[in-house]
Image: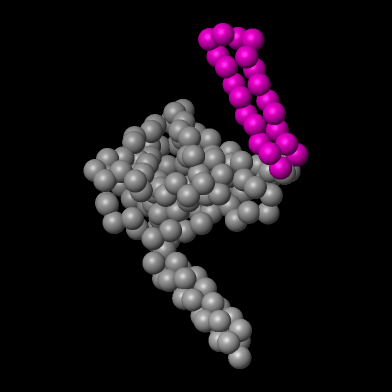
């Protein structure tokens, strides 16, 4: 009887956590993400070190899903607060974006324009991407390195600093 009570309590608490996460999540507004391509890679161990002024290292352990995703952000739109289970390399391909870091208590966004890129470290790093314009569309392309089978995007609650 005690085991059934513990199991019922655990299931109830898990349901509460999942429901609270959905209720507190901050979905995007005017934000559309379209997966362009996905590739599956075994362990990656890439090192380019013979060019002293430019060293590149990419190393993964285990199978990775690598996505290329195109994000369109309407004027005054935003992605909503979210995270990813792995890192992303993001390039601004149209317009200008503001990127807010959930850990930045001053809520000072980084500003990126066409041709500039930034790294989203993933792994629970909460952030929001906003179109800097009230009249023009903004677009980004993201290359994401995620664990095999992982959810690509995880909506998160507003961290309360912006």
47 magenta-colored: yes
18 magenta-colored: no
The answer to whether residue 74 shows anywhere in this view is no
Q: How is the image coloured?
A: one colour
The secondary structure making up most of the magenta span is loop
- Residue 9 versus residue 121: which sits nearer the camera? 9
Report the side of 128 relative to 70 (left or right). Answer: left
Residue for point 58% across, 52% down: 152
Query: In the rendered image of this protein, does residue 151 appear above or below residue 111?
Result: below
Residue for point 40% across, 37% down: 95
Percent position of residue 45, x then y: 69, 28
The answer to whether residue 52 shows anywhere in this view is yes
Query: Which region of the structure is painted magenta?
Result: 42-62
Q: Work out which residue is located at the far right of the displayed protein and give it.
A: 42
Total numbered labels: 0
- Residue 46 versus residue 132: which sits nearer the camera? 46
Report the side of 54 relative to 75 (left or right). Answer: right
Q: Work out which residue is located at the far bottom of the displayed protein and give it.
A: 1
Q: Work out which residue is located at the far left of the displayed protein and give it.
A: 106
- Residue 134 versus residue 38: which sits nearer the camera? 38
Residue for point 51% across, 46% down: 123
Find residue 3 and report its image quarter.
bottom right
Find residue 47 and report its image quarter.
top right
Q: Quadrant of the N terminus?
A: bottom right
Percent position of residue 90, x then y: 50, 36
Percent position of residue 32, x then y: 50, 53
Residue for point 46% across, 28% down: 115
- Residue 96 versus residue 49: which sits nearer the camera? 49
Percent position of residue 142, x then y: 54, 40
Report the side of 137 relative to 2 (left or right). Answer: left
Query: In the rendered image of this protein, does residue 31 appear above or below residue 38?
Result: below
């Amino acid at each position: 009887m005690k085991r059934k009570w513990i199991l019922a309590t655990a299931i109830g608490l898990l349901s509460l956590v999942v429901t609270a996460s959905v209720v507190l999540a901050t979905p995007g507004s005017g934000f559309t993400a379209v997966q362009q391509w996905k590739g599956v890679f075994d362990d990656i161990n890439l090192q380019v070190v013979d060019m002293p002024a430019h060293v590149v290292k990419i190393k993964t352990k285990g199978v990775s899903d690598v996505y290329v995703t195109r994000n369109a952000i309407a004027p005054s739109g935003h992605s909503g607060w979210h995270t990813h289970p792995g890192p992303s390399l993001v390039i601004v391909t149209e317009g200008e974006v503001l990127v807010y870091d959930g850990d930045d208590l001053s809520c000072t966004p980084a500003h990126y324009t066409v041709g500039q890129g930034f790294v989203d470290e993933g792994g629970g790093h909460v952030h929001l991407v906003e179109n800097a314009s009230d009249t023009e569309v903004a677009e980004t392309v993201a290359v994401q390195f995620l664990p095999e089978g992982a959810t690509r995007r995880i909506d998160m609650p507003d961290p309360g600093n912006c």
